[in-house]
Amino acid sequence: MTDTPSYTPPTVWKWEKENGGQFAKINRPIAGPTHDKALPVGRHPLQLYSLATPNGVKVTVMLEELLALGHSGAEYDAWPIRINEGEQFGSGFVAVNPNSKIPALMDRSGPQPIRVFESGAILMYLAEKFGEFLPTQAAERAECFAWLFWQIGSAPFLGGGFGHFYMYAPFKIEYAIDRYTMEVKRQLDVLDRRLAESEYLAGDRYTIADIVGWPWYGPLVKGEIYGDSGTFLSVQEYRNVRRWADTIGARPAVKRGRMVNRLSGDPAGQLHERHDASDFDTRTQDKLTR
């Protein structure tokens, strides 16, 4: 086993130093805002405060899918929250999401604004609001919710577990990497077996279960996240998951949703906000005006 510093937990843990590798400056054991900062508000019904992480992409894909179906009420302003700079701890954002995590949504289409936080809750809210991507038949609806919540419960083992210890931890810990690798491969096998018998997760129709799962497991089985993790995890073994990933990844709304609030990589693959509300409206500009 890889040598690691020995550690004996104290009787009572105290926060005395940064922890979390490159994310150390934004990790803390308390909630609440660290500074006053109001959130921008654009002209469209929905205000999204997020970033193009897998959890953020879930929501932008959903919104783009709704727009592709002609739902003008799904027009939105996308405002990036730079989590590496601690913007999620601003007072305005904490008021929308007391958990200080992206994504967070404000629906200003009614007489009173409605806040919605947690990616799964946002997708369910939008699916019910617009009547799309959520089955109405009882058995299909139950299957959809089951896979949606499966993803919500499983993703921390993939991101905060495997992704962190394999890619971001300040030193490699064999025990941690082995533990979370085993779990991620088990999850991929669960998906592969399901997708061997069903075109999509909830059945023969594309639903919010796929929209919530694809941003994590689609790029994973295509070898697009966590460095060389695709080779490490032997993702080519999961043929049904890869078929599903390719099918969903080819959808125009998914391609666009991946670009929203992306702050790294090729600038041509990024869609950003405009801070001046008078600039909103044009769908063909190089900046996002939703």
Image: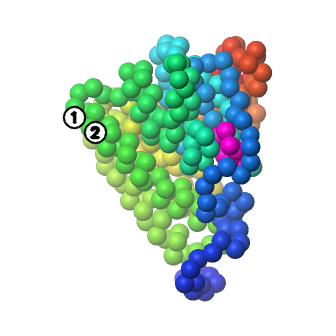
- Looking at the rendered image, the quarter that the C terminus falls into is top right
Asked whether disc 2 touches disc 1, contact meaning CB atoms under 8 Å apart, the reply is yes
Locate residue 93, reporting x and y percent.
64, 40
Callout 1 amino acid: Ala
Side of 266 where 203 appears, left or right: left
Q: Determine the residue positioned at 69% across, 62% down.
A: 24
Side of 89 where 153 appears, left or right: left
Query: In what element is the residue under mark 2?
Result: helix
Q: Is residue 282 visible?
A: yes
Side of 223 where 280 appears, left or right: right
Q: Which residue is more in the foreground, 110 or 44?
A: 110
Q: Which residue is more in the foreground, 93 or 233?
A: 93
Callout 2 amino acid: Glu
Locate residue 86, reporting x and y percent.
71, 50
Residue that numbered label 1 is attached to: 139
Locate residue 175, reporting x and y percent.
51, 76
Residue that numbered label 2 is attached to: 143
Asked if residue 89 lies in the magenta stretch, the reply is yes
